[in-house]
Amino acid sequence: MRKVSEEKANELVVLPYSSGYSDDQIINMFLVACVRSQNTKRNYSRAIERFRQFISYKSLKNVTWQEVEAFKTGLIEGKWGATGKPLAPASVAAFIAPLKSMYKWGSDSNIDLFVHNPTTSIRLPSVPMNSRKHFLTKSEVGKLLNALKRQNMRNYLIGLYLVLLGLRVSELTGIKWKDFYADSSETSIWLTINKAKGGKSREVKVPNRLWSLSIRYVEAISAPGLPAPELVLFPVTTRQIERIIRDTGDRCVTNKKLTPHWLRHTYATLALLNGASLQQVQETLGHAHMNTTQRYLHTVEQLKKAAPDFVMDYLHDYIPE
């Protein structure tokens, strides 16, 4: 066997092993390695595919930062969105963030699928903190729940699970009967959320009254006897739930365009307002970082007593009722 020269051997070592991978293979490897939630995978795949269409399926390895920036600008101006209308900052970020994640992963020295990262200097648009406004008052929650109850038991429970447990829609549609269990003292029922964001799981306590309603509902939709462990609690799509909440909200809650996520914000706000600790709310919502949950704390502090209230208390003798 002919001996390879030292110089030639070094050349062989530095050859990029990534040269044999197609863009489709790279995208698939990225999604498998970095994205666990099926819902997030769909969103990431859609965003990356939209970008590939924009660059006319040019090799991802040859993409420049100018092309990524032009894609972002087009989204902001409404040139590349499905509707042809300018996208909100959060929607633009949802298209750009997957690209930044993919290139950061692929350009890592241990991965070495990309020679450079064209998204390093690409900044995500600033997303306004809408959660400070997107919550319902107590009376609005009551109106929504009463309207859902008049429709049917399923829709009523959907509303209750969203506002009492703070679930995401994708988590709600993934609940199966086997996910419920009693604690060691058999005094409380808990729910395992298996389809949480990032592929993680968490445990959420189910209030007794909600559990009683759930049993009645399951008895009505399942065959006689014990419910099947694989029974899906709400066999509907996320789009259907979004439509139920939106349409019902349009009829009973004025001046607010409701989405299921509004009820998640409402849960966090009401829980903190009524004495729940920040850690309790963080664990129930499944936030990876406390900073995310602390956004709601600002809203609660303002609801309890804002700065103008302190000034009003000090000057109340001079301000007649």
Image: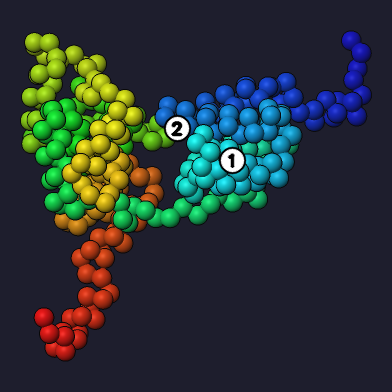
Residue 235 in the image, given as x and y percentages of width and height: 25, 21
Question: In the drawing, does residue 95 fall left or right of residue 237?
Answer: right
Q: CA distance from mark 1 to mark 2?
A: 24 Å
Residue 189 in the image, given as x and y percentages of width and height: 14, 32
Residue 201 in the image, given as x and y percentages of width and height: 33, 33
- Quadrant containing the C terminus in the rendered view: bottom left
Name the residue tied to disc 1.
79
Q: Residue at x 30, y 41 (%)?
A: 259
155 relative to 75, above or below: above
275 relative to 2, above or below: below
Disc 1 on helix, strand or loop?
A: loop
36 relative to 292, above or below: above
Name the residue tied to disc 2.
40
- At label 1, the amino acid type is Lys
| Residue 207 sits in quarter | top left
Q: Residue at x 15, y 35 (%)?
A: 148
Residue 133 in the image, given as x and y percentages of width and height: 31, 55
Q: Are marks 1 and 2 in contact (CB under 8 Å)?
A: no
